[in-house]
Image (cartoon, helix red, strand yellow):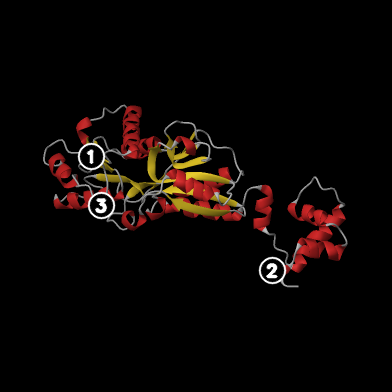
Amino acid sequence: MARSKVSLQDIAGQLGVSVKTVSGALSGDGSIRMAEDTRQRIRSLADELGYMPNLIARGMRQGVMPIIGIVADGLITQPFATEIMRAFDNSMRSDGLSVIVTSTGSGRSVDASIAELQRLMPQSIAYATMYHQVVDLPAAAQDSIALMINCRDSRGSLPSLVPAERQAGADITGRLIEAGRQRIAFFNLPGLLAGALRAEGFRDAHASAGIAVDETLLRPATRGTYSNQARSLVFEHVAELFGGPARPDAILCGNDRVALEVYGALRRHDLRIPDDVAIASFDNQVEIAARLDPPLTTMALPHRAMGRRAAEILAGQGAPARTVEEIPFRLVERASI
């Protein structure tokens, strides 16, 4: 019998039981009583015949499909944030669930994206962003979103998974201090929530070590809000900071792209890394960090861990999400400190 043609009726007919009994045995419905021997015979025959459940029919009966929907705010196009989706999708597949993603922007609103997903009867819908931010969702979307990923709900009412930015700032700064660095400059990412939180961690680490923060060493890496298109200030900062007697002995960079510029600027001034200046960063963009000379010590963004944790929550396999659950970064030690 062809695999695609096997039905509950076929199995019931061969075993002389009701369709309801077959359905209960294959779905694990404990409310349908039967002998264990009957249950095993049904399952064995289903395997032998290659029975495949009709998920669409089951979804229509139950009101949900084995689908998790994602409303993505620019997520799919970003190299780091796609790690969230890759880990999320892999974890969901192991639980027998499929992931459907729809993007906002280009004229499509959040409400429209949610409505599009709801037509597929997903078990739940999450909202994900390409970088850590606070999101002001439309009021109508509040009841439809089960989880915020890489972002926080501005009302503080939805469970959220976010990177532990402040702790990451403290950890990497603490590592520089542990290595004996006392005057640490920070070329931060202006206008971004991640930058503000990492700066708090930078100050926390100094306070824990009993070192006063020299505020003149905290500088924006770009003019205006950070983006790949914003004008860099790195070469100006390096020229000014290393043109006088009170030079920094370390530079913490807002991300690996900033670190790449810092390496070039320091070389112009004949400064050696890490002998004269230690360098550390955030992101672990491997094609940059591992190829710099010397390779860059950096804090790896926790996107894969966020994806796995999101899948665990939405599949109902782990502890429920807290209102804001921070996922820790990972220190990747290389040779720049």
Residue 305: in sight, yes or no?
no
Circle 1 residue: 220
Q: Which label's residue is closer to the chain start, 2 or 1?
A: 2
Quadrant that contains the N terminus: bottom right
Circle 3 residue: 260
Q: CA distance from mark 3 to mark 1?
A: 15 Å
Q: Nearer the viewer, mark 3 or mark 2?
A: 2
Circle 2 residue: 4
Tell me the residue at 40%/38% (across/down).
Answer: 135
Please name whichever residue, 6 or 243, is drawn nearer the observer in this view of the structure.
Answer: 6
Amino acid type of disc 2? Ser
How many C-alpha atoms fall within 10 Å of the one at disc 1: few (<14), some, or many (≥20)?
A: many
Q: Nearer the viewer, mark 2 or mark 1?
A: 2
Q: Position of residue 237 (x, y in %)?
A: 17, 42
Q: Secondary structure at mark 2?
A: helix
Tell me the residue at 74%/53% (across/down).
Answer: 27
User: Does the residue at mark 3 contact the one at mark 2 (Cβ under 8 Å)?
Assistant: no
Residue 299: in sight, yes or no?
yes
How many C-alpha atoms fall within 10 Å of the one at disc 2: few (<14), some, or many (≥20)?
A: few
Labelled disc at residue 282: none
Q: Secondary structure at mark 1?
A: strand
Q: Nearer the viewer, mark 3 or mark 1?
A: 1
How many C-alpha atoms fall within 10 Å of the one at disc 3: few (<14), some, or many (≥20)?
A: some
Q: Which label's residue is closer to the chain start, 3 or 2?
A: 2
Q: Is residue 84 above or below residue 245?
A: below
